[in-house]
Amino acid sequence: MINLITPLDIENKKFSKQMMNGYNVEEVDDFLDELTLDYTKNYKEVNELRDKVEELNKSLEHYKTIEETLQNTLVMAQSTAEDVKKVARQQADQIINEAKGTAQKQASDLDNEIVAKKKELEDVKKQFDIYKAKMESLLISQLELLKDINKDDA
């Protein structure tokens, strides 16, 4: 920080007086009074500006801190969003895989049921063929019996 001459320093400045060819004391005093007024005004303005600069620097630091916090928050939010999307993708994949597994199991169960029903149908057809053969045999034997009875009557 630069040390400035204060208005009080100017006001209190005394010059030694010379007897001959010296400056007019009254003119020097008037000039120093004017200089003191201007310098007082400038001195106050410089101090006010320094205070203002300090205040602005504090505000700037405050806003830099806010900006940094916002950037960190944004990074955290982006990271959280990515994590949420990743978890959602994993859950979706898990649901899809479970659905595929369930569908495959149901398809396999249906295939097994179809095979069982086909076997059951084949068994019923065989039983029907056996029943038909027995009935045919019975009818043939009954027909032979009727023929024998008709021969005896004739």
Image (cartoon, rainbow, N blue to C red):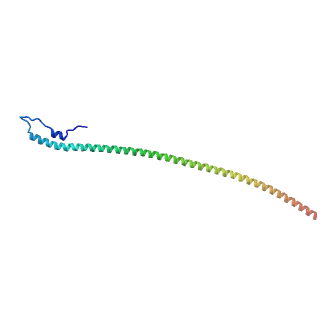
Q: Position of residue 29 (x, y in %)?
A: 11, 41
Q: Residue at x 28, y 43 (%)?
A: 53
Locate the N terminus by quadrant.
top left
Q: Which residue is drawn at 27% across and 44% down?
A: 51
Q: Position of residue 80 (x, y in %)?
A: 47, 46
> In the picture, residue 48 is in which quadrant?
top left
Farthest bottom residue? 154
The answer to whether one can see residue 154 in this image is: no
Q: Residue at x 39, y 44 (%)?
A: 69
Q: From the viewer's perspective, is residue 24 above or below residue 140?
A: above
Task: Tell which of 99 and 44 is nearer to you.
Answer: 44
Q: Where is residue 104 in the image (x, y as percent from the top left)?
A: 63, 49
The answer to whether one can see residue 141 in this image is: yes
Q: From the viewer's perspective, is residue 34 above or below residue 132?
A: above
Locate the C terminus by quadrant.
bottom right
Task: Tell which of 118 and 110 is nearer to you.
Answer: 110
Q: Where is residue 112 in the image (x, y as percent from the top left)?
A: 68, 50
Q: From the viewer's perspective, is residue 136 above or below residue 14?
A: below
Q: From the viewer's perspective, is residue 16 above or below residue 145?
A: above
